[in-house]
Amino acid sequence: MCADTTEQADYKDTLNLPKTDFPMRAGLPNREPGWLERWAQIGVYDRLRERAEGRKPFTLHDGPPYANGHLHIGHGLNKILKDMVVRSQQMMGRDARYIPGWDCHGLPIEWKIEEQYRKKGRDKDAVDVVEFRQECRAFAEGWIDIQRDEFKRLGITGNWDAPYLTMDFHAERVIAEEFQKFLMNGTLYQGSKPVMWSPMEKTALAEAEVEYHDKESFTVWVKFKIARFFGAIGSFDQDGNLADVPQEEIDRINDDYTAMEDASVVIWTTTPWTIPSNKAVVFGQNIEYGVYIVTADVPEDNWAKKGEKFILATNRAAEVFKAARIPVDGYELVRKVRPSGIMEVFHPLNSAEGANGEWDDPRDFRAADFVTDEEGTGFVHCAPSHGMEEYELYRDLGMLKQVITYNVMDDGGFRADLPFFGGKYILSRKGGEGDANKAVIDKLAEVGGLLARGKVKHSYPHSWRSKA
């Protein structure tokens, strides 16, 4: 082009473009349904099977989606990636089969039916169980057809005419038969373990069904009186076994025992409702502890009294006494001690009037690897029915029968015959704060088992459905 040219050039005329009938715009939304229809007419999946006859098989075992709603981006990512795997295996010379399936059981489908009930003002608990299951089955059947068409629209190749359904009666029969095999060969057993549980839905929650949100919780510092030391002083080692203990060690143990006499081990928890299920207190082997005595005259309404002794991790003592409203010059260290000499402690509700002996058995006391002094008191109260670390500790010790309790029912309420707290709920029927925590805190204060109380904001697990 010359420099003095004033005409605006049309650059497309300067390009040597091929001549084609292919549209400039692919028009995929309009064209893809036609392709899918043609694939269905010629039976692409069956023809692939015919051509691959005799080849080495490749089978993708697919975790099926719930039949409870339209597909979302997660479904698309999941199925498209799996389709790529199946197709690539077929192209590499394998007989790559894909049998799609649906999970037709479980809470996601039940919850959808319950949502319909709530809109109509119906009480799910008043519905006959057979009727409820039939409604769930019909709901799943409807969404299977919808999702099947949506998966086909994504171009996923598979045996869509014969999918695997967990609610298929044959599948249910096979599952029952396999379960019976475990029963008959002695490998089936019944046990207990703590699980994430939704009292609103009355079901266990998988880890993927749990969301964590900030929540303001009650927090309490609770006293556990020492019940028993190991053996006669100087006659036994710290594990309760007869031993030839050096005199220097005997003197240390005697001095520790003297300092800890009439003292209380203090625990801290953000779940006061677990205190009625307490079965033990544990400490850390590598944590430094001390016996502290209240030296100041304290107000009458204070739960700590002058002359009262507490065992605490030394680097947690200041925070604990601050929470207990004891001034910095109102307490002092009696002696640094090793709490390993303690064998058992008393539950704070021990011998409480009207408890009918529910908490009179001494509680176990021992070291545990999961105890830290980063927060709390350096001691952890153990309710193995409600905490996985405590459960695993006593499972490995072979002591689960002694420490598992069944105080909390599936609706999140205490069992009716539990003294003081029967019928109290951890969560209200609408998923808010129930009356259990307050009832436990008030009773601890009444019997002298409370050192301090407060509230803390922290991350807490919630059900992703009910948000409770």
Image: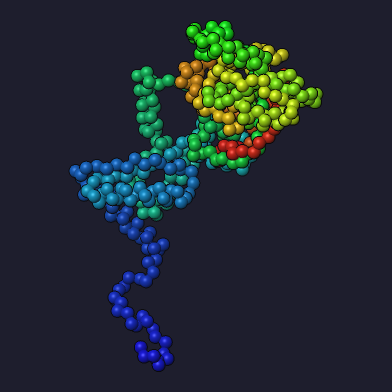
- Residue found at the far front of this picture: 248
The foreground one among 458 and 154 is 458
User: Residue drawn 31% across and 55% down?
Assistant: 39
Q: Relative to residue 266, is residue 246 drawn left or right?
A: left
Give the quadrant of the N terminus. Answer: bottom left
Query: Disc count in the image?
Result: 0
**Residue at (64%, 13%) from the top-left corner?**
258
Residue at 59 percent across and 41 percent down: it is: 213
Q: Residue furthest left?
A: 54
Using the rendered view, name the quadrant where residue 460 is placed.
top right
Q: What is the x, y in percent for residue 45?
A: 29, 49
Residue 431 at what x, y percent from top left? 63, 36
Q: Where is residue 304? Give x, y as percent.
A: 73, 23
* 456 and 116: which is toward the camera: 456
> From where the camera sits, is residue 316 visible?
yes
Image-quadrant location for residue 311: top right
Image quadrant holding the C terminus, namely: top right
Relative to 157, is 253 on the left or the right? right
The image shows residue 348 at horizontal and vertical percentages of 66, 18
Instruction: Work out whether residue 367 or residue 356 is closer to the camera in this orientation and state it.
Output: 367
200, 119: nearer the viewer: 200
Q: Does 30 appear above or below 63?
A: below
* Residue 17 higher or lower than 266, as above or below: below
Colour basis: rainbow
Can the viewer see residue 453 in this picture?
Answer: no
Q: Residue at x 72, y 30 (%)?
A: 328
Residue at the outermost right position? 300
